Image (tube, rainbow, N blue to C red):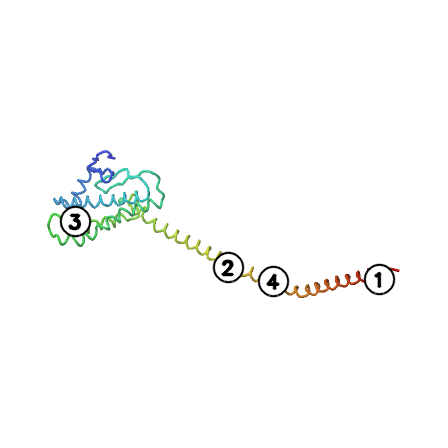
Amino acid sequence: MSGRGSLVIARLRGIPIAVHWSLALSALVLGRLRFAPWAWLGLVLVVLAHELGHAALVRRNGLDVEGIELFGWGGECRHGGYATRWQLAEIAWGGVLAQALLLPVGYLVAPRLGASIPGELLASFGEPSLLMIGLNLLPIPPLDGSRAWSLVAMAWRRRRAARQRSSIARRGAALAKQRERDMRAVHELERDKVSERGEPSAVVLEGEVAEQVRRAIKRAVDEHEPRR
Ligand SMILES: [Zn+2]
């Protein structure tokens, strides 16, 4: 990908990196019109890291990175496919997170290197980058903040829905247990009733046997006593 006024200068893991002419202009402005080529390069690297952070989240979400373009006012990471609001918010955070990972280099490593070339270059990873993060997180389109913060609201809603689901599941389990207890109680009651009935029915059975015996005796007597 290279738009009008842009030139593809490299490919990183298959991702074309293009640079727009306005980058040179902004380097001049951000460098407070001083000739500070290493500080400028540092800023370009911060923007590149930011866009690579977006690219990493694009790929993590299973989408294709079409290309990265660096402008004077920032960068752009274009991706193909359909991204959900959640995915867009995650991708928005990718840029900020990549910059955040470089902050310790700018704040802790760069000062130790003093006024050397690497010191000047890495200093851009500190305060200038933090300033960029702060501005970029304002909830104003097209800044990343306009999409990034919705992740917090969506995560909160997801958490609330998950909590409601688990509370319903807990209540369901409690009801099932209660039903099991009730059924056991009913079975016990029925068993007790059967055993209550069991005693009279044994008497009935005894009575039946006695009746059969009586009939058998009567038959035997009838057979032995000729009818008149
Ligand atoms: Zn961004």
Residue nearest the viewer, comparing 170 with 70? 170
Q: Amino acid at mark 1?
A: Glu
Q: Amino acid at mark 3?
A: Leu
Camera-side mark, 1 or 4 = 1
Residue with the mark numbered 3: 122
Q: Earlier in the sequence, mark 4 or mark 2?
A: 2
Give the residue drawn at x 34%, y 49%.
151
Left or right of residue 61, residue 20 in this image: left
Q: Amino acid at mark 2?
A: Lys
Q: Which mark is residue 191?
A: 4
Residue with the mark numbered 2: 177
Distance from label 4 to label 2 (Cα)? 21 Å
Distance from label 1 to label 2 (Cα)? 70 Å
Assign the C terminus to one quadrant of the image: bottom right
Q: Which mark is residue 225?
A: 1
Callout 1 touching callout 4 (CB < 8 Å): no
Camera-side mark, 3 or 4 = 4
Residue nearest the viewer, comparing 225 with 96? 225
Question: Badge 3: how crowded within 10 Å, few (<14), some, or many (20+)?
Answer: many
Helix, strand or loop for disc 2: helix
Q: Earlier in the sequence, mark 1 or mark 4?
A: 4
Question: Badge 4: how crowded within 10 Å, few (<14), some, or many (20+)?
Answer: few
Q: Earlier in the sequence, mark 1 or mark 2?
A: 2
Counting from the top left corner in percent of width and height, residue 130 is at: 22, 51
Callout 2 touching callout 3 (CB < 8 Å): no
Residue nearest the viewer, comparing 149 with 189? 189
Left or right of residue 158, residue 113 in this image: left
Distance from label 1 to label 3 (Cα)? 131 Å
Ligand 1 shown in quarter: top left
User: Could you tell me how many numbered marks the image carries?
Assistant: 4
